[in-house]
Amino acid sequence: MARSKPSKQLSQTELDRFLAAAEAMHLSIIKPFISPHCDHYRQTRVLHEVLLNTVRQVTGKEVEFIRWNTTGPVLPPPSA
């Protein structure tokens, strides 16, 4: 049986699965309502940042499922 060479990047189907899993992980990280002064909170923030950076590096785009700034969700400018 011949071995195929591993691909150098994820297929679109694999990327879609990766993004769905990343979004689920994002939601599980941000869901708990815990004090920002505890160790668990700080560690989940570290994990969250790593997750977001990884998604950016793998996809080459900004994270689609997070579009927030300090005032709420970032919405596209209204069409004139």
Image (cartoon, rainbow, N blue to C red):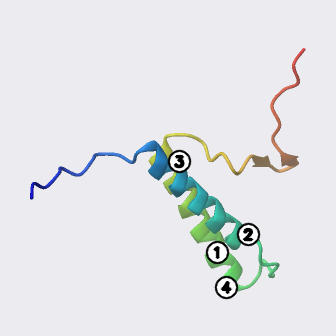
Say if mark 3 contacts mark 2, CB within 8 Å: no
Q: Earlier in the sequence, mark 2 or mark 4?
A: 2
Picture layout, residue 61 above or below residue 51: above
Which mark sits nearer the N-terminus, 1 or 2?
A: 2
Earlier along the polypeptide chain: callout 1 or callout 4?
4
Which comes sooner in the sequence, label 3 or label 1?
A: 1
> Which element type, helix, strand or loop, lies under badge 2?
helix
Q: Nearer the viewer, mark 4 or mark 3?
A: 3
Q: Are marks 1 and 2 in contact (CB under 8 Å)?
A: yes
Which residue is at the front of the view, 69 or 25?
25
Residue topped by disc 1: 44
**Is any part of residue 57 visible from this angle?**
no
How packed is label 1: few (under 14 Cα within 10 Å), some, or many (20 or more)?
A: some
The span from disc 1 to disc 2 (Cα, nearest Å) is: 8 Å
- At a point 65% along the width and 65% down the height, the residue shown is 24
Give the mark, 3 or 2, whose residue is nearer the N terminus.
Answer: 2
Q: Which residue is mark 4?
A: 39
Q: Quadrant of residue 38?
A: bottom right
- Most extreme residue toward the front, as rendered? 1
Q: Nearer the viewer, mark 1 or mark 2?
A: 2
The residue at which mark 2 appears reads as: 30
Determine the residue positioned at 48% across, 48% down.
Answer: 13
Which callout, 1 or 4, points to the residue nearer the camera?
1
Point out residue 43 in the picture as x, y percentages from the top left corner. Answer: 62, 77
According to the picture, the residue beneath numbered tag 3 turns out to be: 56
CA gap, disc 3 and disc 1:
18 Å
